[in-house]
Each structure stands twice: as C-alpha cells, then as structure tokens.
Amino acid sequence: MKDDEQTKFCRDCGASLNARAEICPACGIRQIPAPSIIQLGTIAPNGRSKLAAILLAFFLGGFGIHKFYLGQIGWGIVYLLLCWTFIPAFVAIIEAILLLVMSDERFNAKFGQQR
C-alpha cells in the first residue's frame, strides 16, 4: 500500500492522520465516515426508520401496516378494508421499491414530522 492510501487529513485542523482513525490526535475532533450510496438504517427525527418502513411495506403492505407505521392512518384503513382484493398488496410492493430508492432527505421531509 502506498503511503497516500494510509493517511488522510483532519476535516477540522488539517493534520495528517491514519486513514482508519476515527478521532484526530491533534485536535480531538471525530472524523465523519464517507457516506454510502444507500443508507437503509437511517432514522427520521421522530424515530421512524426507513428500513422498517420498507420491510413492512414489502411483507405486510397488503394490510396497510406500513401506512399506519408512517402515520398515514386514513390510507392504512383503506388498505385494510381492501386487503381481500390483493390490490393493496401489489401497490405496497411498488411503494416498498419507491421507499428503497427515496433519498434520506426526502424520507425525512415526507415522514419525519413529529407525531
């Protein structure tokens, strides 16, 4: 490994440090890890999890459980009343995919309000 690949610079003071270091030894500031492409484990300010919403929509979406979880009680009741038609199940699979590709900022803006 080259020396450049083993070092990075502190985001606060600019000191050179090990690439795997979590805290800068010079200033003591925690280093932020590089963002991943899709972060499923993110949690909105009100405690709703994007991963939980996706899993509920995929597995129990035909009954509208993901709608209740996301605070859309009216839609949850509609899904529950129409669950015998299997239409909500097909729509919920599409919603699970849409939640999967939704950005964290959009998820927080749409579903992250306080209850």
Image (cartoon, rainbow, N blue to C red):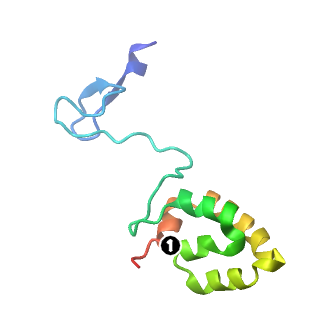
In this view, which residue lies farthest toward the top? 1
Q: Amino acid at mark 1?
A: Phe
In this view, which residue lies farthest toward the front? 84
> Residue 65: x and y, percent?
61, 72
> Which of the 4 image quarters holds residue 83?
bottom right
Helix, strand or loop for disc 1: helix
Residue drawn at x 62%, y 58% is 55
Q: Is residue 102 above or below residue 29?
A: below
> Which of the 4 image quarters holds residue 112?
bottom left
Residue toward you, 20 or 52: 52
> Which residue is under mark 1?
111
Residue drawn at x 30%, y 33% is 22
> Residue 56: x and y, percent?
62, 63
Relative to residue 30, is residue 115 drawn left or right? right
Q: Is residue 67 above or below residue 3?
A: below
In this view, which residue lies farthest toward the left? 27
> Residue 68: x and y, percent?
56, 76
Q: Is residue 45 above or below residue 83?
A: above
